[in-house]
Amino acid sequence: MREFKEVLKGLREERRLSQKELAEDLNLGISTIGMYENGSRMPKYDILEQIADYFNVDMNYLLGKTPIRNSYRDGEFSQWGNDAANQKYLSKNPELLALYNEIKNRQDIYILFDKTKDLDPKDVESVLMFVQTIRKQRGLDE
């Protein structure tokens, strides 16, 4: 099993975050993140919880005790509530159901969604313009 320091660094790099960005997002000092990642310091329980919530992983995964990122219980997916109930409710709208499943199942889309949820509408519009430009350059949109 991996150690906390390796898991944290892996999660941070997976999201393409610098130590500074992660520190800012968690309201911690950059040196604190550095100490966590080099193993010279372990966070207190409340900070571990905050980090686990931030990366949407179980605490045991974060601590390197299990390779399972999120636990499934009785049809529930921890970051989305009751998945079975969500699927049933959204089945009335296939387009919305497809979007829900795409966000839930693709880490890259989840990260994009998560990173833009707190932006004001003008900032989201800028992100959308950027995405539209990329799509046009790749010939995905006319």
Image (cartoon, grey):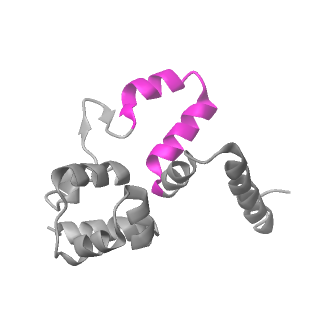
Left or right of 25? Residue 49 is left
* Number of marks present in the image shown: 0
Q: Chief secondary structure of the magenta span?
A: helix
Q: Is residue 67 visible?
A: no
Q: Is residue 136 visible?
A: yes
What's the residue at 40%, 24% (across, down)?
Answer: 85
- Looking at the picture, how far across and down is residue 84, in whole percent? 38, 28
What's the residue at 16%, 65% (across, down)?
Answer: 42
What's the residue at 24%, 49% (across, down)?
Answer: 49
Q: Nearer the viewer, residue 142 or 51?
A: 51
Which quarter of the picture shows residue 72? top left
Q: Is residue 89 magenta?
A: yes
- Looking at the picture, how far across and down is residue 139, in whole percent? 79, 64
Compared to residue 62, the image places residue 41 above or below, namely below
- Looking at the picture, how far across and down is residue 142, in whole percent? 86, 57
Left or right of 43? Residue 91 is right
What's the residue at 73%, 61% (across, down)?
Answer: 130
Compared to residue 86, the image places residue 119 above or below, namely below
- Looking at the picture, how far across and down is residue 23, in whole percent? 38, 64
Left or right of 14? Residue 127 is right
Left or right of 23? Residue 119 is right
View extreme (right): residue: 142
Q: Which residues are magenta?
A: 80-107
Which quarter of the picture shows residue 27? bottom left
Compared to residue 3, the image places residue 100 above or below, namely above
Quadrant into which the N terminus falls: bottom left
